[in-house]
Amino acid sequence: MKRIIIDTDPGIDDAAALLLALASPELSVQALTTVYGNGPVAQCTRNAWRILHAAGRLDIPVHQGAGKPLLREPNPGFARHIHGLDALGDAAVSTPPDSQCQAREGHAALEIIRQVKAHPGEITLLALGRMTNLALALAIEPGLAQQLVEVVAMGGAVGVPGNVSPVASANLYEDPEAAAMVWASGAPLVQVGLDVCNQITVSQPQLDSVYGAGHAAAQLLQAITPCLQASYQRRGLLAQGAGVRYNDLPAVAYAINPGLFQTEDLYVAVETGSELCRGQTVADRNKTTGRPPNVKVCLGVDAGGVTEMFTLRLGNSIIT
């Protein structure tokens, strides 16, 4: 099993991704670290507990992290237009009592450092949110990059448009300086961005199959997913009844089975100096810079394989 830390900002798509990770015997989730993004960081931390509660995994520790970007103010609206006011679809998802939540002292960045140093060469970090916690960890402990097995980062767009600007994805746009630090760190980095996220739609029949399992995790997804679906429909990205895109899902699927993805080793830099292109992943696909590749970029995917994995694993309820 891969030892993984999941850095996350739950988030409806984070919930789907976390539940897939917890339902997958290939992965051993060591901790969740939380960051602002789909909501304020305190809300994202509460949501992490709500998801773990639905999965019956309150044994997994949660460490709260950064509440704002390194150099900028957070988007004051966070992602309420997509994920709702509470970032889980305003579905009145129950929060476990404080006595049941394994809240741990220590900032998320420090916990990432502690775990990696305790298990050098064994930890894979799944970065599903803004890169602020990881950038802080790398700044505090520069040798950390070489001690990670891999960083699987959800974000970026090479051959497709961005989702918050013409060229940038939300996770990199909101804290481009942090992303630039991670991309330049020398850590073994996999970019699971919109190039593949846009190809993966969980169909409505597949969703119904998961919902039909009836367990608490399925009930959570059934309660929160309509908010995300409505957002896609309002923006003209998916037709009614077409299903949903959980954009964090592919990063977890990559950690489980990289063979589902087609990748290219490229030199990629993250733009920080231009407001027009802020957060863009600038990929040297024609080898014009002469710089060696620093990122494994996911450009193709077996979309059916990913959605089938999700449907079977959540529908068969490995989580109890």
Image (spheres, rainbow, N blue to C red):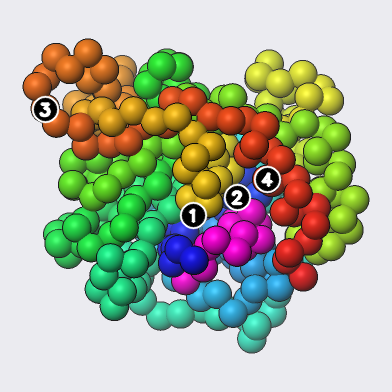
State which mark lies toward you, 1 or 3: 3
Q: Earlier in the sequence, mark 4 or mark 2?
A: 2
- Is 283 in front, or is 110? 283
Q: Position of residue 274 (x, y in %)?
A: 23, 22
Name the residue carrying label 3.
Answer: 291
Q: Secondary structure at mark 1?
A: strand
- Observer-side mark, 2 or 3, equals 3
Question: Is disc 4 in contact with disc 1, using a CB cutoff of under 8 Å?
Answer: no
Is residue 223 shown above or below 194? below
How far apart are the two marked residues, 3 and 4, measured between alpha carbons? 37 Å
Is residue 300 among the parts visible in the rendering? yes
Residue that numbered label 4 is attached to: 309
Q: Which amino acid lies under the numbered mark 2 shown in the image of this protein? A: Ala
Front position in the image: 125 or 66 = 125
Cα gap from disc 1 to disc 3, whole angstroms? 31 Å
How much space separates mark 1 and mark 2, taking CA atoms?
Answer: 10 Å
Q: Which residue is mark 1?
A: 8
Q: Nearer the viewer, mark 3 or mark 4?
A: 4
Distance, label 2 to label 3, CA atoms, is 33 Å
Residue pointed to by mark 2: 17
Which residue shows up at 77% across the image and 31% down it?
A: 203
Q: Residue furthest bottom?
A: 99
Q: Position of residue 66 (x, y in %)?
A: 37, 58
Magenta residues, as a range? 18-37
The image position of residue 306, as x and y in percent, is 63, 39
CA gap between label 4 and label 1 equals 21 Å
Q: Amino acid at mark 3?
A: Arg
Vertical comparison of 100 with 176: above or below: below
Is 98 placed left or right of 70 in the picture? right
Kindly indicate whether the residue at mark 3 contacts the one at mark 1 (C-beta within 8 angstroms): no
| Lower sequence index among marks 4 and 1 | 1
